[in-house]
Image (tube, grey):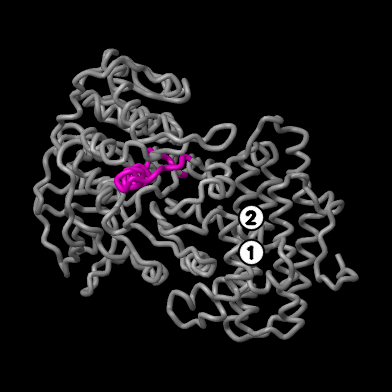
């Protein structure tokens, strides 16, 4: 592979390199583009800072691409049918990634990165991707052995693997499996307070009807259809939830029963959840990615009486007898609503039982109506939003963080766009959200798509885009030059935000895990400053919220409104406030005293200035 007549260092050739799998051809082109950018920067004598930015970007994108490609090979069956090929392929990936990391480290230590280094990287890509070599093996397998209706869903395999490991007890902090402490704990350090919080009285059902009264004609949901998105108003949402609640009560279910919801995120998922609240039933979200044994143990522990599912095979994992009401989420029962019992439920009654898919604990945590409404109210207090805004639902609604985020959006009179995890970029562009509710995997996916787009830009724009992480660092620490950013924003970053539907974004949240500093800088440089949100299933998914600046410094942030943080003598984070669980389902469901600290199972500390850090 030689430089072409237009002096590009590494030229893409469809005939030589294409795998005929569009996703990976685009990623390979981006790797070629980064090599060309690095070569040009070195050849033209650009600053060491710029060369370092491109090296870091090459390292990051290499990690993203290799991980995506390896997951695909496992997901489509190639890794099983040709195990030796897969492991050899992965070893080559590790070798290349290690060399890129080595070159980046040498540069940061002041050593000169020679053109021989670039030649090695170029030749490695040529031999790895070119016809009759490693990447062509899985391409040939995909073409000849994989069914035409197969669709690769990035991230699904990793989630399933984590769930299986959890079910086998292979993950999770040992303290997380310990019973909730029934004795008072004395903090070993300072207490950080989130300030006053007004929490709606009563039940979730009563709260939904208050939203109906305040925002009835406003859009509450954007539901994907073949032609785009259909609108559902708050009137529509409340009316359908009431009718489904009445339909559920005409089955063998009675108030107080526990009903599992095992389905992918959708508008009907939210309807089923709210219908349980109106009917006085306890909703029990079950992750679609749960292993069968994990689902069975969860159902047995909670004592399910009913199951709402989008896949009949979900019934195979739940115990019989016991679960004697089975409902298809696409055919929810309805009836004329009368005096639904959930309206008058006490705020301190249990509304839901939620699970942590990454923990070996199968028993879940019981949350009251008050805890769910407090979590939504805390987000609304700390992240004010004008009525009529739109936020995303990209994550499983079984995750209490995404579910509470939908409540938060509704509490402000805003709509929830049920975009799903597939086609993230297209959906964001279609809904143009004000709030992006994400997890690390969502931002990593978005990062990869942005890099693919940057790779198709001309050299001048790629040169500007190559400094995005440096721009982000400067923006967050206030050391940059506004005029320089204005020019870069006008040339590259503004159009990029427009293309990805992020031009009107007010908040970008990352929960269920922290986003690393490099990606935080990258998104800040693009003009999408991300805020890390720390919370556990025992705190309804919320707890501490960081500014973009604090997120980049590794902080979990400050306690959300109504919440207090401290740490114990052995360095475990403690939380108290209305968002905290009342305990495990069953005999341990008791009303937790307001002054009782909850052990999160997470190592961390609280600084004297009130900043919370998670270790």
For residue 252: magenta?
no
Mark found first going from the N terminus, 1 or 2: 2
Depth order, front residue of 228/134? 228
Q: Which residue was labeled with disc 1?
A: 97
Tag 2: Cα neighbours inside 10 Å, few (<14), some, or many (≥20)?
some
Q: Secondary structure at mark 1?
A: helix
Depth order, front residue of 436/181? 436
Depth order, front residue of 84/542? 542
Tag 1: Cα neighbours inside 10 Å, few (<14), some, or many (≥20)?
some
The residue under the point 80% across, 50% down is 18
- Residue 338's place in the image compared with 584, above or below, is above
Q: Position of residue 357 (x, y in %)?
A: 38, 42
Q: Secondary structure at mark 2?
A: helix
Q: Are marks 1 and 2 in contact (CB under 8 Å)?
A: yes
The residue under the point 73% across, 69% down is 35
Q: Position of residue 179 (x, y in %)?
A: 20, 44
Q: Position of residue 85 (x, y in %)?
A: 71, 46
The residue under the point 65% across, 69% down is 100
Q: Quadrant of residue 496?
A: bottom right
- Residue 225's place in the image compared with 60, above or below, is above
Residue 413 visible in the snapshot:
yes
> Residue 281, which numbered label?
none
The residue under the point 21% across, 26% down is 280
Q: Which quadrant holds the C terminus? A: bottom left
Task: Report the span colored magenta.
Answer: 394-418
Q: CA distance from mark 1 to mark 2?
A: 9 Å
Q: Which residue was labeled with disc 2?
A: 66
For residue 407: magenta?
yes
- What is the residue that sits farthest to the right in this orientation? 5
Residue 615 visible in the snapshot:
no
């Amino acid at each position: 592979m030689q430089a072409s007549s237009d002096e590009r260092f590494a030229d893409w050739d469809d005939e030589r390199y294409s795998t005929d799998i569009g996703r990976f051809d685009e990623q390979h082109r981006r790797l070629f583009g980064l090599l060309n950018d690095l070569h040009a920067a070195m050849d033209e004598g650009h600053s060491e800072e710029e060369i370092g930015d491109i090296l870091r970007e090459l390292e990051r994108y290499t990690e993203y691409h290799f991980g995506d490609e390896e997951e695909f090979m496992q997901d489509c069956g190639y890794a099983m049918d040709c195990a030796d090929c897969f492991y050899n392929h992965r070893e080559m990936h590790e070798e290349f990634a290690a060399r890129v990391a080595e070159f980046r480290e040498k540069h940061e230590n002041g050593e000169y990165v020679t053109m021989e280094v670039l030649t090695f990287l170029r030749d490695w890509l040529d031999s790895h991707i070119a016809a009759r070599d490693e990447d062509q093996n899985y391409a040939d397998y995909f073409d000849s052995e994989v069914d035409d209706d197969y669709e690769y869903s990035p991230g699904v395999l990793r989630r399933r693997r984590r769930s299986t490991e959890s079910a086998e007890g292979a993950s999770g902090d040992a303290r997380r499996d310990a019973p909730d402490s029934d004795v008072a704990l004395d903090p070993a350090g300072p207490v950080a307070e989130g300030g006053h919080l007004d929490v709606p009285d009563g039940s979730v059902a009563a709260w939904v009807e208050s939203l109906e009264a305040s925002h009835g004609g406003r859009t509450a949901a954007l539901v994907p259809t073949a032609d785009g998105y259909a609108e559902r108003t708050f009137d529509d949402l409340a009316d359908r939830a009431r009718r489904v609640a009445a339909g559920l009560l005409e089955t063998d279910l009675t108030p107080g029963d526990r009903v599992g919801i095992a389905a992918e995120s959708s508008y009907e998922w939210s309807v089923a959840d709210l219908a349980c609240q109106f009917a006085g039933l306890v909703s029990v979200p079950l992750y679609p990615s749960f292993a069968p044994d994990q689902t069975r143990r969860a159902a047995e522990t909670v004592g399910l009486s009913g199951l709402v599912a989008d896949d009949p095979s979900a019934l195979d994992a739940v115990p019989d007898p016991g679960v004697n009401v089975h409902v298809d989420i696409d055919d929810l029962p309805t009836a004329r609503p009368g005096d639904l019992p959930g309206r008058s439920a006490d705020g301190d009654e249990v509304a839901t039982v939620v699970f942590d898919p990454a923990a070996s604990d199968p028993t879940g945590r019981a949350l009251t109506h008050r805890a769910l409404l407090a979590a939504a109210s805390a987000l609304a207090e700390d992240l004010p939003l004008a009525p009529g805004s739109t936020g995303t639902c990209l994550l499983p609604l079984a995750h209490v963080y995404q579910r509470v985020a939908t409540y938060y959006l509704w509490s402000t009179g805003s709509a929830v766009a049920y975009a799903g995890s597939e086609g993230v970029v297209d959906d964001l562009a279609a809904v143009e959200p004000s709030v992006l509710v994400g997890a690390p995997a969502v931002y990593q996916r978005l990062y990869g798509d942005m890099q693919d787009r940057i790779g198709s830009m001309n050299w001048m724009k790629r040169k500007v885009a190559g400094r995005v992480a440096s721009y982000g660092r400067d923006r967050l620490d206030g050391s940059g030059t506004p005029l320089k950013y204005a020019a870069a924003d006008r040339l590259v970053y503004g159009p990029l935000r427009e293309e990805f539907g992020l031009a009107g974004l007010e908040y970008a949240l990352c929960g269920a895990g922290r986003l690393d500093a490099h990606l935080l800088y990258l998104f800040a440089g693009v003009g999408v400053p991300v805020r890390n949100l720390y919370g556990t299933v025992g705190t309804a998914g919320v707890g501490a919220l960081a500014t973009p600046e604090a997120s980049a410094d590794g902080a979990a942030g400050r306690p959300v409104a109504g919440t207090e943080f401290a740490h114990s003598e052995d360095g475990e984070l403690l939380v108290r406030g209305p968002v905290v669980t009342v305990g495990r389902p069953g005999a341990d469901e008791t009303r937790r005293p307001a002054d009782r600290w909850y052990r999160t199972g997470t190592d961390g500390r609280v600084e004297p200035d009130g900043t919370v850090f998670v270790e």
